[in-house]
Amino acid sequence: MERIVIHTETIKLDALLKFAGLCETGGEAKELIQAGQVTLNGEVCTQRGKKCRPGDEVTLDGRTVRVAEAG
């Protein structure tokens, strides 16, 4: 599992996918989320604007990243 450090309180799910390198573009992130291919804390999430917080885990194509706080 990879750790992705954010410097804000939250990050939107689509932005996190891009930031973590799980997809190339925001458009690709949107498509993957809407297709039900992304899980947030073990549950399928189809809301691309869903706010992810430190401690959340996001999985796509078998790769899981955990959101972590800076500091």
Image: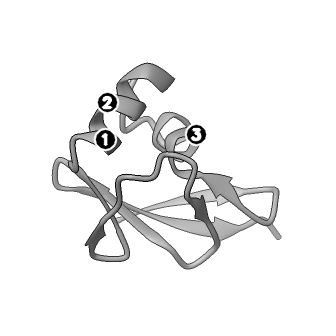
Q: Nearer the viewer, residue 63 or 16?
A: 16
- Could you tell me how far apart the alpha carbons at marks 1 and 3 are, in whole angstroms? 14 Å
Q: Which residue is mark 1?
A: 34
Residue 25 visible (yes or no): no
Q: Residue at the spot x=28%, y=73% of the render?
A: 43
Give whichever of discs 1 and 3 has the lower sequence position.
3
Q: How many marks?
A: 3
Q: Which mark, by number, is residue 31?
A: 2
Q: Pointers 1 and 3 in contact (CB under 8 A)?
A: no
Q: Position of residue 69 (x, y in %)?
A: 72, 70
Task: Kindly identify the amino acid type of the residue bearing the numbered disc 2.
Answer: Glu
Q: Are there few (<14), some (14-19), or many (20+) residues within 10 Å of tag 2?
A: some
Q: CA distance from mark 3 to mark 2?
A: 13 Å
Q: Residue at the location (58% across, 39% down)?
A: 15
Q: Tell me, yes or no, whether the two marked residues, 3 and 2, touch with CB atoms within 8 Å.
A: no
Dot 3 corresponds to which residue? Answer: 15
SS for dot 3 = helix
Cα distance in 3D space between marks 1 and 2 = 5 Å
Mark 1 is on which residue type?
Gln
